Amino acid sequence: MDLFKRMKSGEFPDGSRTLRARIDMASPNLNMRDPVIYRILRATHHRTKDTWCIYPMYDYAHPVSDSLEKITHSLCTLEFEDHRPIYNWFLEELDIFRSRQIEFARLNLTYTIMSKRKLLELVNHGFVSGWDDPRMPTISGLRRRGYSPAAIREFCKRIGLAKRESMVEISLLEYCLREDMNKHAPRIMAVLQPLKVIIDNYPEDRVEWLDAENNPEDSSMGSRKLPFSRTVYIEQEDFREDPPKKFFRLAPRREIRLKHAYYIKCEKVVKDEKTGEIIELHCTYDPKSRGGWTNDGRKVRGTSHWVSAAHALPAEVRLYTHLFIKKDTGEVEDGKDFKDYINPESLEILRDCLVEPSLKDAETGTKYQFLRQGYFCVDPDSSKDKLVFNRTVTLRDTWAKIQRSMCLF
C-alpha cells in the first residue's frame, strides 16, 4: 500500500512500477496470471486533466466501471471471451454489483471499416473531416448523414446476434433506411444540375401556385404550394438532344410532364457558341394539362421534377457514397494498407443546386426525399444564406440500370 500511495503521489517515473492482481501464475488463461491493473503514466486526461499520474488497465477498469454504472449486461465482441474469467474475478473479489459480460460476433459491414483504431487513423490523417463525417460508421456520422434511430434499430433486429464472424451487406442497412424514410420524409423539388427551360407561350408576369402532396405514403402530412412561372430549371440529365432508345425524358419535339404542373414540349435548343454546351431550352406548354394530365387521353411517359427560376433557393449538395472501394476491407493484399482502398469518389460536392422555396427555414437534421434523387438531410454547415444538404441514401434509378446494361454490349 505504501508503494501504491507513492506511485499515486508521483514519486516514481513512468513505467518504473506497476500494481498487479495476485491471482494464479499457473493459470492456463494468460489473462489470469497476475495481470497489471495500475501503471504509472503522466498523460493529460480529457476530463481530469493532470490530476492523476496512475491509470487502471482495461481489464480492471472494465468490470469496475460497469459495476459502478449498474450495467446489467456488458456486451463485448468475441475476442473478450478469454477475458470473462478475470472480469468475474474482480467483481467477486471486490464484492460489488455483478455485471454480466456476454460476447458476440463483431458487426462487419461491406465497404466499411469498423475498427476504432483504423477509424482513428482516418481522422488523424485527414481522410475524413472528423468523427462525425457522414461517411464514418459512428453514431455521430450516421446522425449527420441522416440515419434515423428507427432505421438502425430495424437493421439490428434483422441481423440479430451471432457467435460466428460474418460480413453483412451494407445494402441491408440502406434498405432499412429507405423503408423508414419513405414513410416519414416529406417530398421536395430539388434540381442538382440545373438546365434552364423557358416556356415561350407562358405569360411572363404570371405565377401560379400549384398543389403538391408532402408524402403520398402518409396523407396526414398534408400538401404544400409550389410556385410555377415562365422560366424553370430541370435536371441536365433529363434532356438529350439525340435520345437513345428507352429514354423517355425531354428531347427535341418531345413532350414530357412537369411534376404537379403541365405538359411541355421542347421546341428549340440554345448552345454556347464557344463550347457547344447546351445552356437553355425553349419549350411550349399545354394550358389544358394542369396537374399533369389531359382529357384527350394522350400518353406522356416522361416526368421531370423542376423548380421555378424566380423562386428557387441556392443550395450546396454533398453526395456521399461508400468510403472504400473494396467490399471486404479486412482482406488486404500483400504490401498494401487498408487506406489504399479508400474511394477517391466517396464525396462529390455540387455547389450550384436549386431547391424549392418551402425549404427556406429548414432546420439542421431535417430529412427530405428529393424527388427522383434520393433522401437528404440538412447539414450543420447550412445557413440562411446557403442551404447545405447531405445525401443519406439514393433511390433506385431505373434509367441508370438501363444505361449500365447498355454498356455491356
Image: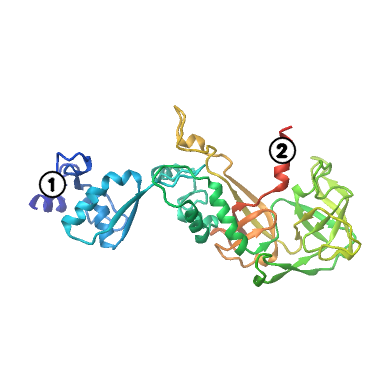
- Tell me the residue that label 2 is attached to: 405
Residue 393 location (% of width, % of height) = 59, 52
Kind of residue sitting beneath label 1: Arg
Residue shown at the point (79%, 65%) measured from the top left: 228
Q: Are marks 1 and 2 in contact (CB under 8 Å)?
A: no
Query: Height in image: 307 above or below 402?
Result: below
Residue 107 location (% of width, % of height) = 44, 47
Q: Secondary structure at mark 2?
A: helix
Query: Height in image: 360 above or below 244?
Result: below
Residue 236 location (% of width, % of height) = 75, 48
Q: Residues within 10 Å of mark 1 (few under 14, many from 20)?
A: few
Judge by depth and name the residue closer to the eye, 76 or 200. Answer: 76
Q: Residue furthest left?
A: 2
Query: Height in image: 200 above or below 214?
Result: above
* Residue 42 in view: no
| In this rendering, position of residue 381 left or right of residue 372 | left
Residue 170 location (% of width, % of height) = 53, 47
Judge by depth and name the residue closer to the eye, 156 or 268. Answer: 156
